[in-house]
């Protein structure tokens, strides 16, 4: 697997934030989870390579501008996945 993180920065609290810039249109809420899959993988790679999981990941759509922001979650054992539904916090923010 190979990828390039568009932006990795520290927020005001010193936590990592991963931003993926997008040139396409903002997806409907139905497609948000699929759209966020890539930045969640970047969060996992940050944790493995840098020893810290980002505090948030976000997709920044240049066409609006609008951001879809999520809190990364830890991988969950598929047998216990139902107990962890809802741990991902998502919201849209017009910029």
Image: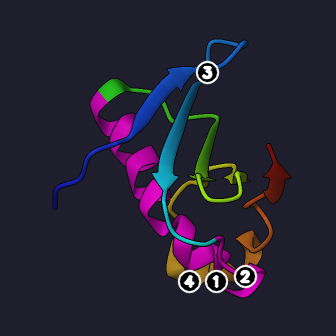
Identify residue for label 3: 15
Q: What's the distance in space between the residues labelled 2 and 3, CA to CA?
A: 28 Å
Q: What's the distance in space between the residues labelled 4 and 2, CA to CA?
A: 29 Å
What colour scheme has been applied to the protein in the rendered image? rainbow
- How many labels were placed on the picture? 4
Q: Nearer the viewer, mark 3 or mark 1?
A: 1
Screen quadrant of the C terminus: top right
Q: Are marks 1 and 2 in contact (CB under 8 Å)?
A: yes
The local secondary structure at tag 1 comes to helix
Q: Is residue 38 above or below residue 21?
A: below
First in sequence: mark 4 or mark 2? 2
Residue shown at 83% from the left, 51% from the top: 93
Identify residue for label 2: 28
Identify residue for label 1: 31
Give left or right: position of 36 versus 38: right
Residue 67 pos. (x, y %): 70, 52
Q: Main secondary structure of the magenta part?
A: helix
Is 47 magenta? The answer is yes
The local secondary structure at tag 3 comes to loop
How dense is the environment of label 4, judged by Cα within 10 Å: few (below 14), some, or many (20 and up)?
few
The local secondary structure at tag 2 comes to loop
Q: Nearer the viewer, mark 1 or mark 2?
A: 2
Residue 76 appears in the picture as rendered:
no
The local secondary structure at tag 4 comes to helix
Query: Depth check: 21 or 10 in front?
Result: 21
Q: What's the distance in space between the residues labelled 1 and 2, CA to CA?
A: 6 Å
What residue span does the magenta drawing correspond to?
A: 26-49
Identify residue for label 4: 79
């Amino acid at each position: 697997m190979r990828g390039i993180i568009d932006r990795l920065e520290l927020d005001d609290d010193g936590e990592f934030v991963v931003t993926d810039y997008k040139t396409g249109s903002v997806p409907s809420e139905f497609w948000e989870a699929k759209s966020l899959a890539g930045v969640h993988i970047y969060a996992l790679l940050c944790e493995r390579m840098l020893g810290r999981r980002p505090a948030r990941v976000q997709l920044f759509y240049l066409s609006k501008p609008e951001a879809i922001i999520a809190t990364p979650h830890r991988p969950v054992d598929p047998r216990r996945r139902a107990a962890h539904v809802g741990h991902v916090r998502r919201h849209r923010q017009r910029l």
